[in-house]
Amino acid sequence: MATELKLTAPKTFRYWISGDFEKAKKLIIVLHGYGQLAEFFIRKFNEIPEDYIVVAPEGMHRFYLNGTSGRVGASWMTKEDRESDITDNLNWLSKLFTELTEQKTFKKRILLGFSQGGATAARWFYSQKVQFDQLILWASVFPPDLERPIIQSNSNNYFVIGTEDEYYNTEAQISEIKFYQNIGFNTLQFEGRHDIENDTLKRILK
């Protein structure tokens, strides 16, 4: 009979930064979706205001997108041993946050999670391990394992989704928007698909 055992060992994580760290007054950490790489995901934020530094951590599980060679993507977790992955994600992201904020004091600290990265972002935001000023969940389902947050009438958290998002039909979009409104999020829709839309993002960041 086989017995499952676990061993904790160091692992090297990577992240990408865009912007002038010395001049930046605001920080936005962006978590990519399933099958994306941080190197390419961070390019979607090239148009945000210059007073931001953009930091894109990468999910710790990399894999070939098709077969056993070619393009590579990353994932935050799967259904297998997800509790360990959730803990590891929170620990390494919090270590990154500490490293960034010990180097510099930011006027505003924002966390954005896109698609699969939204679940990790929500867990991190509500874990109380670190302190963010704003959470933006973009085309992402709120993780069912989290308790519903206490509703704040002055919340500046957002849920955003494109009207043509290929992963959400009209009925699903209506359901998600209603859910987020019920837990105190502002909600926005834009004309587009399952992607970051810069005009909508800049509207939120203002």
Image (spheres, rainbow, N blue to C red):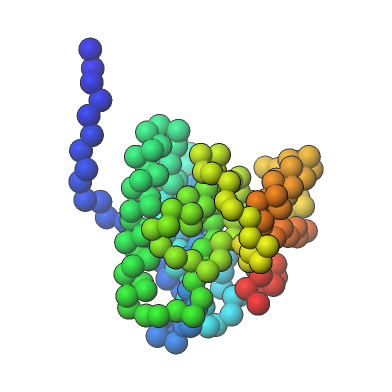
Who's the residue at 71% across and 53% down the image?
A: 181
Quarter of the C terminus within the rendering: bottom right
Quarter of the N terminus within the rendering: top left
In this view, which residue lies farthest toward the bottom? 23
- Residue closest to the eye, 137 or 78: 137
The correct choice, above or below, for 61 with respect to 130 in the image is above
- Where residue 95 appears, as percent x and y from the top left, is 32, 61
Who's the residue at 70% across and 67% down the image?
A: 200
State left or right for residue 169 relative to residue 117.
right
State left or right for residue 109 relative to residue 205.
left
- Residue closest to the eye, 157 or 6: 157
Q: Quadrant of residue 134?
A: bottom right
- Where residue 137 appears, as percent x and y from the top left, is 60, 56
All told, the count of numbered labels is 0
State left or right for residue 160 relative to residue 24.
right
The correct choice, above or below, for 13 with respect to 100 in the image is above
Residue 148 visible in the snapshot: yes
Residue 40 visible in the snapshot: no
Who's the residue at 75% across and 58% down the image?
A: 189
Who's the residue at 45% across and 79% down the image?
A: 106
The correct choice, above or below, for 145 with respect to 181 in the image is above
- Where residue 126 appears, as percent x and y from the top left, is 48, 54
State left or right for residue 3 relative to residue 172.
left
- Where residue 120 appears, as percent x and y from the top left, is 48, 50
